[in-house]
Amino acid sequence: MKRIIHTDKAPAPIGPYNQAVIANNTLYASGQIAINPATGELVISDIESETRQVMENIKAILHAADLSFEHVVKVSVFVKDMHLFSRINAVYAEYFNSDTAPARELVEVANLPRFVNIEISVTAVLA
């Protein structure tokens, strides 16, 4: 059995998918880009603001499932330019305790939805 997670504090899906699904005590969150859910506008003035909006969208989805970043066990990060890694990583580190941080990969890709610079998805385990 699966449970759909939805919150208006994160961007609504723009296709046949959900913000997140819980199955077998695991939350699988769809990739998030830097859409401000209040305005529907992209936050792309700089990579730090863009990454922070992505992480806030993920935070909202986690909270809708009564979870936090401490429950996250795996993160997938897709970036358009690997040269942005250190700036992305600095913002990312604001959301995770380095002692309990999840596993992660960061991959450079040719393009992302709406031609943003970063997309992040997470997998979390319910306590």
Image (cartoon, rainbow, N blue to C red):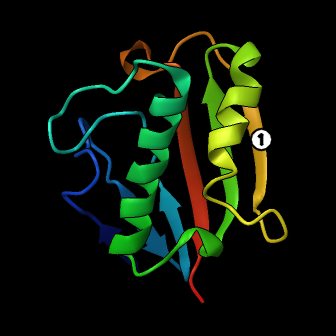
Q: Residue 86 versus residue 57: which sits nearer the camera?
A: 86
Residue under the image location 44 percent in, 60 percent down: 59
Q: Quadrant of the C terminus?
A: bottom right
Farthest residue, direction left: 39
Q: Residue 63 versus residue 123: which sits nearer the camera?
A: 63
Which residue is denoted by mark 1 in the rendering? 105
Farthest residue, direction top: 110
List x then y, in percent, for residue 54.
45, 41
- Residue 43 seen anywhere in this rendered image of the structure: yes
- Residue 31 seen anywhere in this rendered image of the structure: no
**Amino acid at circle 1:** Glu
From what the image shows, is residue 114 above or below residue 13? above
Quadrant of residue 33 within the rendered picture? top left
Farthest residue, direction right: 99
Residue under the image location 45 percent in, 54 percent down: 58
List x then y, in percent, for residue 8.
18, 57
Residue under the image location 66 percent in, 32 percent down: 88
Residue under the image location 23 percent in, 35 percent down: 14
> Does residue 83 appear to the left or right of 11 in the view shown?
right
From what the image shows, is residue 52 above or below residue 94? above
List x then y, in percent, for residue 105.
77, 41
